[in-house]
Amino acid sequence: MVEPALIKAAQAGDREALVTLLREIENQVYRTAYYLLNNEQDALDASQDALIRIYTKIGSYEEKAQFRTWVQRIVTNICIDKFRRKKSSVSIEEHEMVFEAGDNVETEVLSAYAAEEIREAIGKLPEHHRTVVVLRYLQDFSYNEIADSLNLPLNTVKSYLFRARQQLQILLQDYQKGGVRG
């Protein structure tokens, strides 16, 4: 939770307060971008764009909405724009799995597979469903905060989440039965 005094100082032109504010929110911004775009490089680009926009627009923030809702609206809109512009492409990324000594390797591997399955399933959701899932389950937004952030009616948010959960259940059926895709 960002301190209101820090926000006010940043709005008043205190550069140090603004830098501190941006550092406090950068992980949250990246996390949202990553789960919406499902690609590390795109998420880094979107995060940077969002932080720059927050930097330049901090003066326009009004306390009508919560600060984190305002920030998420900016990140979400940037990600939606990037998603729409993005042509279908294949990303070739190599991931290294690093295990610390003493860890249960089997548990680590299964957790990594589960996380990847879930991330892939979220990535297959339609854009509007993916957005509400990320805000609700990864950013822990309330239904009202999601509605405010996306400028949607509350019932639409609930409907999107319901449908997204149904789709995720179908997409994760094999994993739930104990199967691992190969």
Image: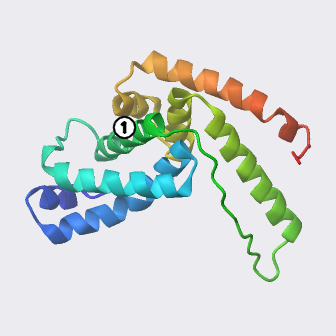
Residue at screen point 27% across, 62% down: 21
Counting from the top left corner in percent of width and height, residue 56 is at: 18, 53
Quarter assignment of residue 13:
bottom left
Residue that protrudes farthest toward the right in the picture: 178
Q: Is residue 100 visible?
A: yes
Residue at screen point 66% across, 28% down: 165
Residue 165 higher or lower than 91, as above or below: above
Residue type highlighted by circle 1: Asn
Q: Quadrant of the N terminus?
A: bottom left
Counting from the top left corner in percent of width and height, residue 150 is at: 38, 30
Nearest the eye: 74 or 141: 74
With 161 as the anchor, is 77 left or right in this view?
A: left
Residue that protrudes farthest toward the bottom in the picture: 101
The kind of secondary structure element at disc 1 is helix
Residue that protrudes farthest toward the left in the picture: 12
Residue at screen point 41% across, 55% down: 45
Counting from the top left corner in percent of width and height, residue 174 is at: 87, 36
Quarter assignment of residue 96:
bottom right
Nearest the eye: 46 or 89: 89
Q: Is residue 1 visible?
A: no
With 71 as the anchor, is 10 left or right in this view?
A: left
Counting from the top left corner in percent of width and height, residue 169 is at: 75, 30
Q: Which residue is identified by label 1?
A: 77
Colour scheme of the rendered structure? rainbow
